[in-house]
Image (tube, helix red, strand yellow):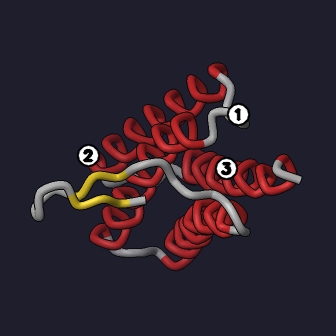
């Protein structure tokens, strides 16, 4: 786990995935994708403010960047090289979506639906990793 090296620096070691912690970690990784899919759908339906959209997209972008780096490193048995490449491409797509929608202010419904579907699919894919441990 975490180790304090000189009182100021915290160094993260390998993640302890024993005793049910793996299942909890998987659940914790999947839930934000579901939450963001729901928030995007609600914002689309309810006509959210530009500030709300910006917060949703920035969170979505951060989450995809994080997961595209985290999964290949810490779940290398479940994440092939091809899957890691796909995660990187989706993260790049999310970057482009965030920038495009922030710049022009328009929220293309079809594009939003794609983002929602990608988030829901990612949630499902992460949850499927629970079964691979059995």
Q: Is residue 75 left or right of residue 49?
A: right
Marker disc for residue 122: 3
Instruction: In this rendered view, identify the residue nearer to me: 95 or 82.
Output: 82
Q: How far is disc 3 from disc 2 in space, using C-alphas?
A: 26 Å
Which mark is in front, 1 or 2?
1
Task: Name which residue lies at 41% across and 65% down.
Answer: 56
| Displayed quadrant of residue 31 | bottom right
List x then y, in percent, for residue 38. 61, 71
Secondary structure at badge 3 equals helix
Q: Residues within 10 Å of mark 3 (few under 14, many from 20)?
A: many
Task: Name which residue lies at 23% across and 58% down.
Answer: 10
Q: Which mark is first along the chain, 2 or 1?
A: 1
List x then y, in percent, for residue 104. 29, 47
Determine which residue is flagged by label 1. 77
Secondary structure at badge 1 equals loop
Q: Is residue 128 left or right of residue 57?
A: right
């Amino acid at each position: 786990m975490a180790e304090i090296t000189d009182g100021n620096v915290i160094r993260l070691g390998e993640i302890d995935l024993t005793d049910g912690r793996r299942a909890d970690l998987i659940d914790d990784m999947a839930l934000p994708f579901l939450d963001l899919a729901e928030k995007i759908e609600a914002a689309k339906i309810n006509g959210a403010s530009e500030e709300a959209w910006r917060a949703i997209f920035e969170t979505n972008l951060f989450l995809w960047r994080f997961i595209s780096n985290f999964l290949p490193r810490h779940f290398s048995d479940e994440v092939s090289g091809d899957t890691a490449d796909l995660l990187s491409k989706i993260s790049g797509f999310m970057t482009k979506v965030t920038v495009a929608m922030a710049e022009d202010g328009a929220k293309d419904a079809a594009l939003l639906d794609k983002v929602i579907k990608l988030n829901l699919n990612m949630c499902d894919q992460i949850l499927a990793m629970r079964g691979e441990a059995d």
